Image: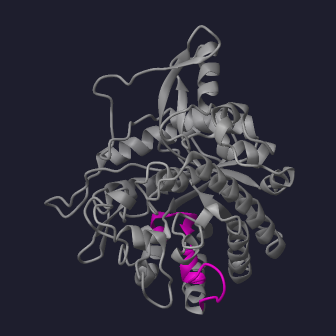
Amino acid sequence: MRFPQNFLWGSATASYQFEGAASLDGRGYTVWDDFCRRPGSILDGSNGDIACDHYHRYPEDVAIMGDIGFGAYRFSLAWSRILPDGIGAVNQKGIDFYNALIDELLKKNITPCITLYHWDMPYALYRKGGWQNKDSVDWFANYAEVVARAFGDRVKFFITFNEPQCFIGLGHVSGEHAPGNIMSRRSVLEMTHNVLMAHGKAVQAIRSAVPDAMIGYAPTSGVACPNTDRTEDIEAARKAYFDVPDQPNYMWNVSWFSDPVFFGKYPEAGLKVFEKDLPDFKPDDFKLITEPIDFYGQNIYNGYSVEDDGQGSYRRLPRKPGFARTACGWPVVPECLYWGPKFLYERYKKPIYITENGISCTDSVCLDGKIHDTERIDFLHRYLLSLGKAIEDGVDVKGYFVWSLMDNFEWAKGYTERFGIVHVDYETQERTWKDSAFWLKEVIKSGGAIL
């Protein structure tokens, strides 16, 4: 198997999980800073104040990326490092940090891929109502314009939002992520609509400042995979994947967050489920939401099996006893990286980037001083084979970003989960390549041929 010659191999991180320097050089307070100070919110009682100290160690980290052979680095900006209050005065020291990081990446021939928002809203804006405030559409567009004008001479690859299902669903439906404010279904749907409009207005702002920008959007999904190759089961899986089921975390679906962006309307299944709680939508809202984008990012980690129920719908199958799981309990479902891109490409007809994929393992430094993460290598091998098969079958997948470059602060799990291909000793900040980093270097060097 060989991936396309111009295929983009990258790694990914997020600002709050990785940068540290939480109170240095004018960075403003965020919802995650505040959430971590709420007793019981984080499994190990930790926070992202220091994290991987990337703020001070970025030259070393970029050198690691270059040595592995990554052609791209997807990183999020800390909104409050650039605009401490979310709006108003720009913090030049924040701009300077990202300028230095971008220049370092370009020296190593690594494409900088900016994500505007990976969950760390400035606390000053949360106090104004956060995403429920309609002004958030303009706040975010203003931030996007500042970013585009500051970095658009060198950065051409932009993503507006990372996983809105999570920062809305986990932040306001289950409450297990920041800001941990559980709200009514109507309020949550209002926030979702404002986020989608903010996406559209940010696209306009970036396009205006950087006409040659490549702009995308990166939601997430658990993929419905057909139990067999029967046509009936494949169609059942497709229906399940784009359905909007009425479930406890009703934000966890694909089509409510993507149909408006590409089709200019919410899916009928969701309109029925949410009928009693729908806020007022204006036709012009959807003109903004459907502002054209260049690619569709998708974070995919796992999936579930579906079969035809014999009545024109689908049946979700229980997992087999003893099914394979990652260290954090997520199921191992390699075929999700075939069926997810396939179904998404057929429905939305946009080039696809896998903007996150990876595994948490119980990694430790062995007696020989090395980290032998054979489970991660096997996971990535299986998933990349599935992705390669999707490409061979005509799915236009442009790139793959492994999550994550190195171990970091894993949100509500603190430092108890390790997703990196590079090990971090959080006491010394020493970085050590895991076996998976050496393996992935050979995969990239061979263009996937060693798979």
Task: Classify 256 as above or below 67.
Answer: above
- As drawn, the residue found furthest toward the top would be 310
Q: Is residue 155 magenta?
A: no
- Of residue 396 and residue 144, the one placed in the foreground of this image is 144
* Image-quadrant location for residue 85: bottom right
The structure residue drawn at horizontal position 78% and vertical position 54%, both measured from the top left corner, is 289
**Which residues make up the magenta segment?**
65-91
Q: Name the spot of residue 104 as percent of width and height, x first.
A: 55, 81
Q: How far from the left and from the top, in percent, is residue 268? A: 73, 32
**Mark count:** 0
Q: Quadrant of the N terminus?
A: top right
Query: What residue sits 54% from the left and 35% below the top?
Result: 223
Relative horizontal placement of residue 373, taking residue 312 as reference (left or right): left
Q: Position of residue 43 (x, y in %)?
A: 28, 58
Residue 208 relative to residue 192: left or right: right
The residue sitting at the left extreme is: 367
Residue in the foreground of this view, choosing between 230 and 368: 230
User: Is residue 354 visible from the viewing direction of this image?
Assistant: no
Report which quarter residue 226 is drawn in: top right
Q: Position of residue 355 (x, y in %)?
A: 57, 54
